[in-house]
Image (cartoon, rainbow, N blue to C red):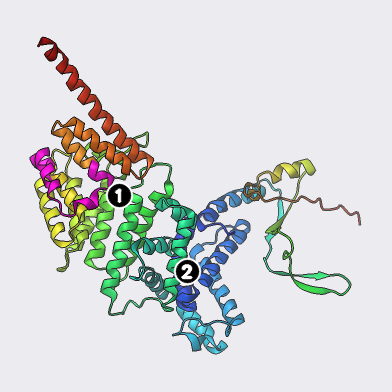
Amino acid sequence: MMELSEHLFRHEHGRMIGVLTHLFGVHNLALAEDVVQDAFCRALEVWKFSGVPANPSAWLMATAKNRALDILRRERTARNYAPELGHLLQTEWTLSPTIDELFKSQTIADDQLRMMFTCCNPLLPESSQIALTLRVICGFSVEEAASAFLISQDAMEKRITRAKKVLAGSRTLFDLKDSDLCNRQSAVLRSLYLLFNEGYHATSSEIVVRKDICLEAMRLTSLLLHNPTTSTPATCALYALMHLLAARIPARMDEDGHIVVLKSQDRTQWSSELIAEGKRLLDLSAEGTELSEYHIEAAIAAVHADASSAAETDWEMIISLYDSLMALAPSPVIALNRAIAVAQLEGPLCGISAVEEIADRDRLLHYPFYHAAVGEMQLLAGNCAIAMHCFDEAQLYSRNASEKAFFKQRAEVCRIIEMEKSDRCIPACQRE
Amino acid sequence: MAAPPETMEKIMPKWMSWMKELQDNGYLKAGRPLERSGKLVTGKSRTVTDGPHVESKDLIGGFVIIEANDMNHAIEISHGCPALDNDGCVEIRPVMKLDM
């Protein structure tokens, strides 16, 4: 009996949705989702008796295709389907050949990409684009998507419903030959980058779903690399970055589920396979003249990957890469990361001045790692009381229990050092 | 409310291992899933309505014919049915012996 490959349904979801939405039109996305759900239910009913077929994805696709044919025959005139196919679906003579053509493997693969591009509609906020991608392409339930984003199910439901309404306005899938391809692809890459980050900053070991979204982001990026139109150097660089960051996942948490910062990570736990693959991809991405932020971020991750410890890291190189990143896509978070590198190279006081020079620094005030970074620098500079205050601030803005526990522990370290300092003071005072 | 793909995928191996167990122990004689659509024919007037479960909340997913020593044995075998994990139910009906 065939074994079921892991996440088969998630992976097939986007392929089936793509081709069905091509057929029914984007405004009938709900119908496409029903057909996919129906195919999964059927698989569950049949496979439990007959076992998993030799080619489960072909089985699912054929089931979806038959169901689509049923619907089109029964409701041929009741709805408006994809405008460009409209007349072809009207008669039995053209219906079958049209559908056979659509369900060819190349069209299926293209349609899945077109659906991804459709979800990243610039009319939608980025948070909706990635929620929609998870729901529609990766087949996450609203509940799974909500727990991945750490928001309520209700809020996620609303976000997705609103986003689907906006999509329905376009009716046809985004065309990869569209003149706006370049801009839309940037939006797609940005969404995949955010999706990966959302999962990467998962800190609690029990929330498996958040690690899954890292894997999904990587899988979708690899789909872009399989198509000559979308396989750009930036895509390759993003894929490289994801590999280099994913390599560190095993070392990011200790056995008790607590955060371990980059500086203290056991680097022998980093995945050498992922690092090697990331570097290979980074080399590949150097083709052409395009330099994206993903190139630079991947280069920074590669410098870290090459260093056997924080002390032996080529901080000078990292600072200059951050300088390039600031020139390309300035943001206070990048400036903060640059300042952290400056502190490593030139000492905490230089780091603190670099932080003070950040333009738009007030935009970082709700970012817990801003306070934590300043806290670490102040602690190194011997200003324990200020450092402790910084970690208290970080706790205030922490986004989950592991973060909060980590900042609390750092504040505690400051308190202990501060106490030891005053203990040492006592004999001196008594001498007076 | 339909289960998300990931959940459905997790249920599948349970079913397959249960069915395999029935087969390996020689209990399984026959079995088929049932289509979800069907017709309901009622009463003297032979009224035909869409069914079979429009009015009822129960959805009969399929049937299996097993060979068990007695009712207790059949109950014991039913305990492994994954439908129960989902708060579903298994109805056990002995097939009547006819000496003909």
Task: Judge from the rendering whether residue A385 lies leftward or rightward of residue B97; answer left or right.
Answer: left
Q: Amino acid at mark 2?
A: Met
Disc 2 on helix, strand or loop?
Answer: helix
Up-down relation of residue A279 to residue A368 (above or below) = below
Which residue in the protein does label 2 denote?
A: A16
Res A241 quadrant in image = bottom left
Q: Position of residue A211 (x, y in %)?
A: 38, 49
Q: Chain of mark 2?
A: A
Q: Position of residue B53 (x, y in %)?
A: 72, 64
Same chain for mark 2 and mark 1? The answer is yes
Q: Quadrant of the N terminus of chain A?
A: bottom right
Is residue A1 visible from the viewing direction of this image?
no
Question: How far apart are the alpha carbons under marks 2 and 1?
Answer: 28 Å
Is residue A34 visible from the viewing direction of this image?
yes
Q: Predominant secondary structure in magenta? A: helix
Q: Quadrant of the C terminus of chain A?
A: top left
Name the residue nearer the viewer: A47 or A238: A238
Residue A285 forms part of the magenta stretch: no
Magenta stretch bounds: A342-371
Q: Residue furthest front?
A: A432
Disc 1 on helix, strand or loop?
Answer: helix
Please tell me the numbered disc located at residue A246: 1
Q: Position of residue A308 (x, y in %)?
A: 18, 40
Up-down relation of residue B46 to residue A83 (above or below) = above
User: Badge 2 local density, few (<14 within 10 Å), some, or many (20+)?
Assistant: many
Please tell me the numbered disc located at residue A23: none
